Amino acid sequence: MKLAGHISAPALVLPFLFAAACQQLPKTDPSEAYKGVVINEIAAHEDVDGIDTWVEIVNTSGQDIALDGLSFFITDEYFSGQDIGALSGTLAAGERKVYSTADGALRTGIASDAAFTLALGPDAQHPVDSYERAEDAKALGYFGSYQRIPDATGEWKYVTYSSEGRANELFDLSKTRPTAVWAWGSHLSDLTADDGAKLRNLKKLGYDHLLMNYAGFENKNYRQQAINCIRICDEIGLAVHVWLQAFWDGDWVSPIDDKSKTFREDIFERIRNDAARYIETWGVKGVHLDYIRFGGTASKHNWTTEVNSVNAVNRCCREIRETCDSYGEGLVTSAALMPEPNSSQYYGQKPADMAKYIHILMPMIYRYGSYNFSDTSFKERSDYYAEQAAKSGGVSWSGIQTYDASTKGMSAEALRKDIDIMAQSKASGVVLFRYQLGTFPDVNDLWN
C-alpha cells in the first residue's frame, strides 16, 4: 500500500537521469547551418587611394543556404572581431556574391599592407570560414586580390589581377584569340568613354589583347582612365599588356658601356623593375618589349663573345621572362621586332634566340612606306618570323599597319585583305598598329 505523499524510488531517480542526459548532449555549433559557404576572394584596398575593398563568397555545397545571421568580422590593428557587414538572402548552390565598400555592403575597407584576419560567421567566435593575411605578405596593387586557386576549393594565393564575380583562374594565353592592338595612353579617353563602348566593340570584333603604352599608366592625367580601362577589360575578357620601351628613353640608350666593355646593369635593372611595377600595381596580363634593339648601330657594341649586342637583347628578353614567370600567373611576354631578316649587325635581334624567352614575337611588317611589300613579300616576311620563332618553340603574331603611306586610315575591307594574307601565312596571329587609325574589321572567323 502506498502512503499519501510518498514518492517511490524509481520516480525519484528518473528526474536525475533526465537532467544528467541533458547535460551530456553536445552543444550545437551555430556555424553548422552555413557549412559550405566560403570566402573565395578578398580585394583589400583600403591602403590604395580611390579603390574599393570587396569580398566574394561562394556556396560550395549542393543546396541553397540562407545567409541571414551571417556577418563579416575583421581583426586588425584597429578592430578585434568587429562586425563590418551583415549578409542576408539566399545563396544558391554554386552561386557567388560580392560585398563591397562601393555600395556600403562592407562598412569599412581592409588594408593589404598590414596583418588582418577576416572571418565569416554568425559571430566572431564561430567562423564558417576565415582568411589570415600575414604581416610580411605582399600588399595589393590596384587590381590585385587574395584568391582561392582553384576556385572556391584551393589554397590562398596572392594574385596581381582579380576576378570579381567570376571563377578564380590564372591567365591562360591559349584560351584567347591571337589578335592584338597597339594603343597609346592618349587613346584611353576614347577607349573608356560611354562605359568602354569602343573597348567592348574591339572585343566583339574579335580582338583579345590590348598593348597599352606605359605612358597610359605613368601619366597622372590618365590614371583614372587607365583604372577604368583595366576594369572594363577584365570584365569583358580583353587582356591588357604593358607596352614598355626597353632601350629608349626619348633617345637610344645602349645597354652596353663601351668604355668598360661591360653590360650596363642599371639599364637591365630599370627594365626589370618597370615590368614588376606595372604587373604588381596594374595587374597587367603581359609585358610587351618595344625598342628591344639597337638603333642601327649594334655592330659598334660587339666587344667580346659575352658582351655584345645580340647577347644584350637576349639577356633583356630572358630577364623579363624570368620576372613574369616568377609570379606564377600565366603572364605573357612579347617583343616588337624590325622586319628585316638577318640584320642582327644593325639591331642585335636574332628572332630564334629571342623566342627562347619571349612567348610571342611581333615583327613590325609595315608594308606601306619604307618597305612597300608586295602581297608575296608581305606573306614571305610573315613566314620568316614564324619559322624563326618555331625553332625555339615560340610563335609569331605579325604586326601590320592600319594606315597607308600617307598615314590615312584604311577601310575595313582593305585592312581585312592584309589580315587575310597574314592568316594565310605561318603566323599564329596578328597585331594592329594602331588604335584610332583605320576601321578595324571583324576577325572572329580567323585563327579558330
Image: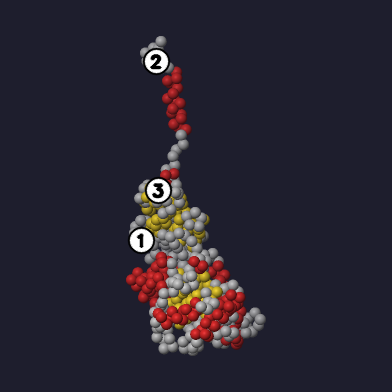
Q: Quadrant of the N terminus?
A: top left
x and y percentages locating residue 259 in the rendered image: 61, 85
Quick one: 415 or 67, which is closer to the camera?
Answer: 415
Q: Amino acid at mark 2?
A: His
**Helix, strand, or loop for circle 3?**
strand
Residues tagged 3 and 1 counted as in contact (Cβ below 8 A): no
* Residue 102 falls left or right of residue 390: left
Foreground disc of the pair 2, 3 = 3
* Residue 7 falls left or right of residue 331: left
Q: Residues within 10 Å of mark 3 (few under 14, many from 20)?
A: some
Q: Is residue 9 above or below residue 79?
A: above
Q: Amino acid at mark 3?
A: Ile
List the residue tagged with mark 2. 6
**Outermost residue, top side:** 1
Q: Residue at x 46, y 67 (%)?
A: 283
x and y percentages locating residue 284 in the rendered image: 47, 69
